[in-house]
Image (spheres, rainbow, N blue to C red):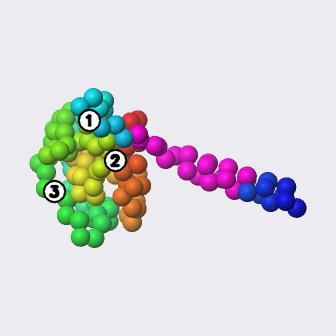
Amino acid sequence: HQQQQILVQMVRNERVVRENSHLVALPPVVGPGAPMLRIRSKEVLGLMSVVSPVAFAALTPPGVIPAVIPVPAIGAIPPLLPGGLYPGTQAAILTLTHVQILNLMEYYNEDFGIVPGEPIGVRVNKVGRWIHR
């Protein structure tokens, strides 16, 4: 009976690992020697808030107001955080806020696979995966 319980728990653990395998662990690297990430250029014309206003509104958490940004040209490179839009290091990805993620969504006209109601940790993870792909 005890061996059967151990086997059941092992199967459950494997299922959890498989379900969470899409999550990416981004190690925090901080300081002046932190490696820079590849900066993705704009690939899709327009802003998400203009092209898909209903979807953009649905992905905006209550009380969060994204910045108004000018429409960038295809191939444009966003300015880096702080003060800009793009997280230049893995540590900067880990500190993204809802507003910063919405600004990236709007700039790139990209939802990163984020769905309404997802917590900030899940959103950060999805943005990190998009940046690293």
Residue 123 x, y percent position in the rendering:
37, 54
- Give the position of the N terminus as an image quadrant: bottom right
Return the residue at label 2. Answer: 94
Q: Earlier in the sequence, mark 1 or mark 3?
A: 1
Q: Which residues are magenta?
A: 10-27
The answer to whether one can see residue 90 in this image is no
Q: Answer above or below: position of 59 versus 124.
A: below
Q: For mark 1, what is the residue?
A: 31
Packing grade of label 2 (10 A; few <14, some 14-19, many >=20) is many
User: Where is residue 111 shown, x and y percent of the image?
Assistant: 34, 52
Q: Which residue is mark 3?
A: 67
The kind of residue on which mark 1 rests is Gly
Q: Quadrant of residue 93?
A: top left
Which of the two labelled residues, at mark 3 and mark 2, occupies the earlier sequence position?
3
Please say if the residues under marks 1 and 2 sit with CB atoms less than 8 Å apart.
Answer: no
Residue 14, given in percent of the width and then of the height, sits at 67, 50
Asked if the stretch drawn in magenta spans residue 21, the answer is: yes
Q: What is the three-letter code of the residue carrying label 2?
A: Leu
Residue extending farthest to the bottom is 62
Lateral position of residue 12 relative to residue 124, left or right: right
Residue found at x 29% / y 32% = 34
Q: Please rate how many residues cluster around mark 1, counting C-alpha atoms within 10 Å: few if below 14, some from 14 to 19, many from 20.
A: few
Q: Secondary structure at mark 2?
A: helix
